[in-house]
Image: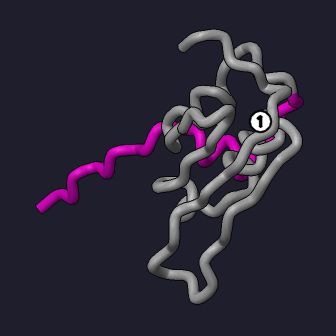
Amino acid sequence: MARFDYKKSAELFPSRSRKANRPMGYRRFDSAAEAVRFAIEELPREFLLGAYMEVDEKRFNHADIRRLYENADYPLPRPTNGGKAAAKTAAPQAKAPVPA
């Protein structure tokens, strides 16, 4: 991925959830770093999966947002308590087969 400017303003478009009665709507952020942090640390998983972020008319899907968050250049502190963000960025675990 080319060098990304986390200081540019960003727009976040969460997906609609089939579970939620009230879908989360569009949000504008002063910096892309804030949008990435919000998407990974605060946005419910069902809204993140189909979400996209737009910076300078370029779109980033949920996987791109996750990569930007995990990138060494990401400027904001990440939670160290292994909370929601850690759970959302971890790879899904395969279920063990049930013995017969």
Amino acid of disc 1 = Ala
Span shown in magenta: 76-100
Furthest residue in direction left, as rendered: 100
Residue drawn at the location 66% of the way across and 11% of the way down: 3
Residue 30 image position (x, y, % from top left): 88, 42
Residue underneath mark 1? 32
Q: Nearer the viewer, residue 70 or 13?
A: 13
Q: In this view, does 30 lie to the left or right of 33?
A: right
User: Where does the C terminus fall, quadrant-wise?
Assistant: bottom left
Residue drawn at the location 81% of the way across and 30% of the way down: 8
SS assignment for the magenta stretch, majority: loop
User: Where does the N terminus fall, quadrant-wise?
Assistant: top right
Residue drawn at the location 67% of the way across and 35% of the way down: 55
Q: How many marks?
A: 1
Q: Which of 58 and 41 is in front in this view?
A: 58
Furthest residue in direction top, as rendered: 3
Is residue 16 placed above or below 95 in the rendered structure?
below
Residue drawn at the location 69% of the way across and 18% of the way down: 4
Dot 1, how many residues are within 10 Å of its Cα: few (below 14), some (14-19), or many (20+)? Answer: many
Instruction: State which quadrant residue 60 falls in.
Output: top right
Residue 21 image position (x, y, % from top left): 58, 88
Magenta span contains residue 63: no
Residue 64 image position (x, y, % from top left): 53, 32
Element carrying mark 1: helix
Identify the coloring: one colour
Magenta span contains residue 94: yes
Is residue 66 placed above or below 96 in the rendered structure?
above
